[in-house]
Image (cartoon, helix red, strand yellow):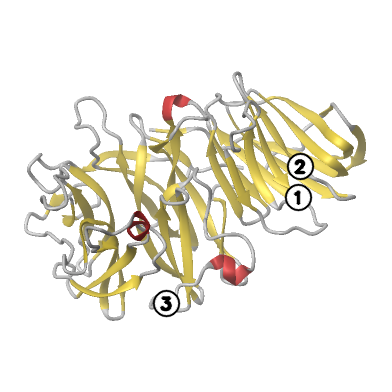
């Protein structure tokens, strides 16, 4: 089993602009400043891959503008190609914020390229909000695509509110603004794509079709910092909540270990590209930070039209692992499997030492009601449980030293499971952990207690047949 994780040689990778051309995935991304670069500013950087394993670092793509220009910070946007083969990048220009009546803090800008490598800014292009309808500053993350009527752009905006608006009203003022163009240069506003009255902003919007459904992917920072989605039978809506369509689950494509994710189609697969954040002070209990590692997953369309996720680089594992039985009752079941259980507590089996980059698949078929099954990753300074809670129908990543008043690092709803085997795939690239439950539920996380050095499997309060296979992802992807 391999994973798709990439780290910039310096700084942290942030919001992404994935684009596929000639069967190559180009990921333009924002990066935290280093050295003498201005604090709290970004530029576009560029990496590319055709196999999600080997990455080519093309360095800076679109640089920062001057302090007095619209784009001393170049932020998220999108890339398209016109009929003449010219590539167009639509970016967000962030300038200094000088109060509500100061110059526009955010506007859409434009650049072109003949080869996706060298970009030329268009000094005559500037697209800001209509102040009569929208907030004059929050106007970012344009996404452009083409339909039968021409070019469409959606972006993250907010309604214009009176000065005495409450915090709650401001928190629900976000909408997905929509514009149209015939030539990519002159744009006019049309009715919003989605105006739900739910969030402050719908960051990094992305619209695409798969089968008979259309999808709107976006990210929020209100109740949770996650990437969410909606589904519709046409790009005009109505945009349905997937948890209502499914009758369970939620609308997030991952937990807060993956943010600002967008999609791209590569050789018949729909890839989900985002970033896994770091935490302040390099501590699991630290504040969530902007930027980290690029991560690629694959989107899966279920029979009801809802979306799931799987590890994009997943493949065959190596031979079954030789376990060393620990706590609980263990007996050989044949075919590389064990019968294991502990009707009151935790049964454990050791995998022994593991490499800083690795992968383990645990398959468990219960013989009686069972509470949890999982993998324990043991680092030099901390240990972590990656578990499927079969009672609460959740996948959980938790650290061993968590205090009672602290929440687990990650908890994600998992699809209800019958008596069929639960398959838990866990891959790690040093401190980035990717978990897949079944065929279509992924959890992305970062563990700050160091990469694992040992691992063990466990079964809690139940009994069943367990098999473990191990593989190694195709290396740590660093620039």
Q: CA distance from mark 1 to mark 2?
A: 8 Å
Q: CA distance from mark 3 to mark 1?
A: 35 Å
- Mark 3: which secondary structure? loop
Question: In which quadrant of the rendered image does the C terminus lie?
Answer: top left
Residue 267 in sight from this viewpoint: no
Residue 237 has which mark?
A: 3
User: Which residue of the protein is positioned furthest toward the top in this rendering?
Assistant: 380
Crowd class of label 1 (few under 14; some 14 to 19; many from 20; radius 10 Å): many
User: Which residue of the protein is positioned furthest toward the bottom in this rendering?
Assistant: 149
Q: Nearer the viewer, residue 403 or 385?
A: 403
- Residue 297 versus residue 352 in the image, above or below: below
Q: List x then y, in percent, for residue 33.
A: 26, 32
Check whether the beta carbons of the residues at disc 3 and disc 1 lie within 8 A of each other: no
Check whether the beta carbons of the residues at disc 2 and disc 3 lie within 8 A of each other: no
Q: List x then y, in percent, for residue 166.
A: 32, 57
Crowd class of label 2 (few under 14; some 14 to 19; many from 20; radius 10 Å): many
Q: Tell me if 263 is positioned left or right of 420 in this view.
A: left
- Mark 2: which secondary structure? strand
Q: CA distance from mark 2 to mark 3?
A: 40 Å
Residue 390 has which mark?
A: 1
Crowd class of label 3 (few under 14; some 14 to 19; many from 20; radius 10 Å): some
**Earlier along the polypeptide chain: callout 1 or callout 2?**
2
Tag 2 residue: 373
């Amino acid at each position: 089993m391999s994973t798709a994780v990439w780290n910039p040689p310096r700084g942290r990778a942030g919001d992404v602009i994935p684009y596929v051309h000639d069967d190559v995935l180009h990921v333009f991304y924002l990066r935290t400043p280093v050295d003498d670069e201005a604090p709290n500013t970004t530029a576009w950087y560029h990496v590319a891959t055709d196999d999600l394993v080997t990455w080519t670092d093309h360095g800076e793509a679109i640089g920062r503008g001057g302090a007095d220009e619209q784009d001393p910070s170049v932020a998220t946007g999108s890339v398209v190609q016109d009929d003449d083969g010219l590539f167009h990048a639509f970016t967000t220009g962030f300038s200094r914020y000088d109060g509500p009546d100061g110059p526009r803090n955010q506007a859409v800008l434009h650049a072109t390229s003949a080869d996706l490598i060298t970009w030329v800014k268009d000094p005559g292009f500037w697209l800001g909000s209509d102040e009569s309808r929208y907030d004059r500053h929050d106007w970012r993350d344009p996404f452009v695509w083409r339909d039968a009527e021409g070019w469409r752009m959606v972006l993250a905006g907010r309604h214009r509110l009176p000065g005495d608006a409450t915090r709650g009203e401001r928190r629900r003022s976000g909408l997905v603004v929509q514009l149209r163009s015939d030539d990519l240069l002159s744009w006019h506003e049309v009715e919003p794509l989605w105006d739900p009255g739910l969030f402050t902003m719908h960051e990094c919007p992305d619209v695409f079709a798969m089968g008979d459904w259309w999808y709107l992917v976006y990210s929020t920072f209100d109740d949770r910092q996650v990437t969410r989605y909606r589904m519709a039978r046409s790009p005009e809506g109505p945009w349905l909540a997937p948890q209502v369509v499914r009758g369970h689950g939620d609308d997030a494509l991952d937990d807060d270990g993956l943010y600002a994710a967008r999609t791209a189609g590569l050789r018949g697969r729909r890839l989900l590209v985002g970033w896994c954040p770091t935490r302040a002070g390099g501590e699991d209990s630290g504040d969530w930070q902007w930027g980290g590692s690029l991560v690629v997953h694959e989107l899966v369309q279920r029979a009801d039209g809802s979306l799931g996720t799987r590890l994009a680089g997943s493949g065959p594992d190596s031979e079954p692992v030789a376990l060393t039985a620990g706590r609980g009752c263990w007996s050989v079941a044949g075919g590389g499997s064990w019968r294991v259980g502990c009707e009151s507590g935790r049964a454990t089996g050791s995998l022994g030492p593991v490499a800083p980059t690795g992968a383990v698949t645990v398959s468990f078929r219960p013989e009686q009601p069972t509470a949890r099954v999982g993998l324990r990753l043991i680092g030099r300074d901390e240990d972590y449980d990656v578990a499927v809670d079969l009672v609460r129908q959740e996948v959980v990543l938790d650290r061993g030293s968590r205090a009672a008043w602290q929440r687990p690092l990650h908890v994600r709803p998992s699809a209800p499971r019958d008596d069929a085997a639960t398959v838990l795939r866990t891959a790690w690239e040093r401190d980035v952990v990717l978990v897949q439950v079944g065929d279509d539920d992924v959890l992305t996380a970062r563990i700050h207690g160091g990469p694992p050095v040992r691992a063990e499997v466990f079964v809690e309060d139940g009994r069943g047949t367990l098999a473990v296979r191990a593989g190694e992802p195709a290396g740590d992807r660093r620039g």
